[in-house]
Image (tube, helix red, strand yellow):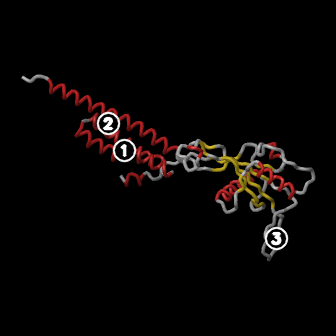
Amino acid sequence: MSAMLLAINWEPELRGVLTVILGVVAFMGSIYLILGTNLGARLGFLVTLCGLAGWMALMGGIWWVYGIGLKGADPSWVQVPGRTVIQDAGDLYQSGVLENRLNLTDGADPAAINTVVYDGFIAEEWRVLGESEPAFGQAAASAGVFLEEEGAFDPGTFKVTNVFEIGGEAYPKILGLDALDQIAFFHKPYYTVVEVAPYVPLRTEPGRAPAAPEVDSSQEAQYVYMIRDLGSRREPAALITIGSTIVFLALAWMLHRRDRFVAENLARKAALPTG
């Protein structure tokens, strides 16, 4: 078997198909062969398939709990179509990020505009992430990719100054308690806004180390509007667990029903008069 697999290592698709076929024949087929010779072809097949479904249900349950094995898409930040990069503070209301208009005046100092925007997010109960939180770095990295894709900034020419987030709460919860969220399978949309500020252009001089970058206070900050895709990491395992459990229960019921028929037939035979 090993020699055969090594011989076709150049074709991964064919190798995977043959691995599954050989696994079915060697492992499940051998169990069915043993049970079939002792219980009969039909009963041996039912017992083998029932055992396989039970094992699949247990394995899928472990995968489901720990998020391992066959996994779906991982959580990630994705763009909000048409509203990903917002280069003007006044567009935060127009794009639907904020529910209320900001009190902005024409010709205001960029630092004052940034302060008004920050207060606007706080007033609408957006959470401000600290730089030490893991979500801050993850959101900043995703925002950097979107900024570079949109051509708003080149790599290394901006600094992430604030990260705001809102939503993401799970529901329904038992008695409204976070500690009792075993049935909280649904989530509200989880939005994130990353505020970035451009650096002052640096002049490089031969033979001298580059100066530390400084934020350009004469320019307004820009904003990256993203939504958190919670992914489907446990979805394949959940489908395997639920489907295998249904098959296992159905086969177990069929075996139980067969045992009852056999017992009734044996009792009827024993009740017949002899001689």
Residue 266 point in image, percent of width and height: 19, 29
In the image, is 258 to the left or to the right of 56? left
Residue 182 screen position, x and y as percent? 53, 46
Instruction: Look at the image and tell me whether residue 12 can be seen.
Output: no
Quadrant housing residue 194: bottom right
**Considering the image in quadrants, where does the C terminus appear?**
top left
Residue type at the position of mark 1? Val
Q: Secondary structure at mark 2?
A: helix
Please, what secondary structure does the residue beneath circle 3 have? loop
Q: Which residue is mark 2?
A: 46
Which residue is at the far left? 275
User: Could you tell me residue 87's position as x and y percent?
Assistant: 82, 51
> How far apart are the two marked residues, 3 and 1, measured between alpha carbons?
65 Å
Please give the name of the residue rendered at 93% of the width and 53% of the height, measured from the top-left corner. 107
Q: Give above or below for 268 relative to 126.
A: above
Q: Is residue 200 above or below residue 230?
A: below
The residues tagged by marks 3 and 2 sit, at their Cα atoms, a distance apart of 77 Å
Foreground: 45 or 271? Answer: 271
Q: Amino acid at mark 3?
A: Thr
Residue 258 shows in this picture: yes
Q: Residue furthest bottom?
A: 207
Q: Which residue is mark 3?
A: 204
* Label 1: element kind: helix
Other-residue count near label 2 (Cα within 10 Å), few / some / many at <14 / 14–19 / ≥20: some
**Mark 3 or mark 2: whose residue is earlier in sequence:** 2
Q: Are marks 3 and 2 in contact (CB under 8 Å)?
A: no
Q: Sort mark 1 into few (<14), some (14-19) or many (20+) by Cα contacts within 10 Å.
A: few
Q: Nearer the viewer, mark 2 or mark 1?
A: 2
Left or right of 222 in this view: 67: left
Residue for badge 1: 24
* 47 in relation to 2, above or below: above
